[in-house]
Image (cartoon, rainbow, N blue to C red):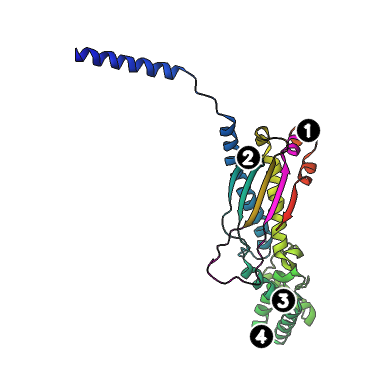
Amino acid sequence: MTRTSSLIGAAALAAIATTAAAQPAAPPTAQDQLRHQIYLMEGMLARAVTSGAARLNSQFRAVMPDMVVVAGESNARGFHLDGYGVFFDVEVPVLRQSMMWSLRTMLDQDQQGASEALASLRAIVASTTGPDRAVAEAALRRLEVQLRPFGLGRPGAGPAEATGLQAASRTASAASVPEPAARPKVNAQLLEDPNKAYTEAVVQALIEAMVDNALPMVSFLEPEAYLTVAARDNERRDLLAPPNPYEQVSTFTLRIKAADLAAYRGGKIDREEAKKRVRIQEF
């Protein structure tokens, strides 16, 4: 009797499992789809910040190959706020101020100190005699080419033209050490105000990510809802230490209406107009 009951129970369970498997899975709800879109957007925003930092690094590396002024990872977290829209908190890698300070100090910004140092080196090379002169000329020539993007190096072959050496001597020294190719110039704003240049690069990258990648999210938002991105540096500060009176931490908030994104998706406005409709605020 017990064995028969067990067989009947097993058969019933198998029938229930087969019936459940035959039924189609419930489609994802609107909340599930919005949650998925927020997850995708988190990755898009983080990669946009990383891309903006990489572009800034590449401009410095054009002059100084070993220099990295922005390091670290970006992170983004998204939240749905009922009655408002979707909000993203984005952490931005910190601009390494020590590197920028070293670069500005080395170049002396007004170029007076660097120009005087080059003039002294040229005078020393001009007074050098014997076999060491060709080596000194070649070294000075390389230094001038390195500093040429900053307006300090001369476009000529080096001190040989200024000292009136014979053409044979110039040809021999040039042949022994080939002149490196001139490097592209660095945007002056990067040296004058690197914080502003970095901020603009990150803000533009975030705006493009918002306009290009948030369109699928529009279907799950009310027209008056907002897509908001708040970006701030990710430097960890000691909360127990006294505040630094010279430190100013800013948060940039980018906001666009779902209706504007819907207009872009529907072809009523173009991409540039959609980007212009992103409101930027600094706090």
The answer to whether the residues at label 1 and label 2 have Cβ atoms under 8 Å apart is no
Q: Nearer the viewer, residue 221 or 160?
A: 221
Query: Rounded to the nearest whole Å, what is the CA distance between mark 1 and mark 3?
Result: 51 Å
Amino acid identity at mark 2: Asp
**Can you give x and y, in whole percent of width and height, for residue 88 in the image?**
62, 47
Amino acid identity at mark 4: Gly
**Mark 4 / mark 3, whichever is N-terminal:** 3
Q: Residues within 10 Å of mark 3 (few under 14, many from 20)?
A: few
The answer to whether the residues at label 4 and label 3 have Cβ atoms under 8 Å apart is no
The answer to whether the residues at label 4 and label 1 have Cβ atoms under 8 Å apart is no
**Mark 2 / mark 3, whichever is N-terminal:** 2
Q: Which residue is mark 3?
A: 108
Front tag of 1 and 3: 1
Task: Please give left or right for residue 49 compared with residue 13 in the image.
Answer: right
Q: Residues within 10 Å of mark 2 (few under 14, many from 20)?
A: few
Q: Residues within 10 Å of mark 1 (few under 14, many from 20)?
A: few
Q: Which residue is mark 2?
A: 82
User: Which of the 4 image quarters holds residue 181?
Assistant: bottom right
> What is the span of residues highlighted in magenta in the rendered image?
233-262
Residue placed at 59% from the left, 45% from the top? 78
Amino acid identity at mark 1: Gly
Q: Which residue is mark 4?
A: 130
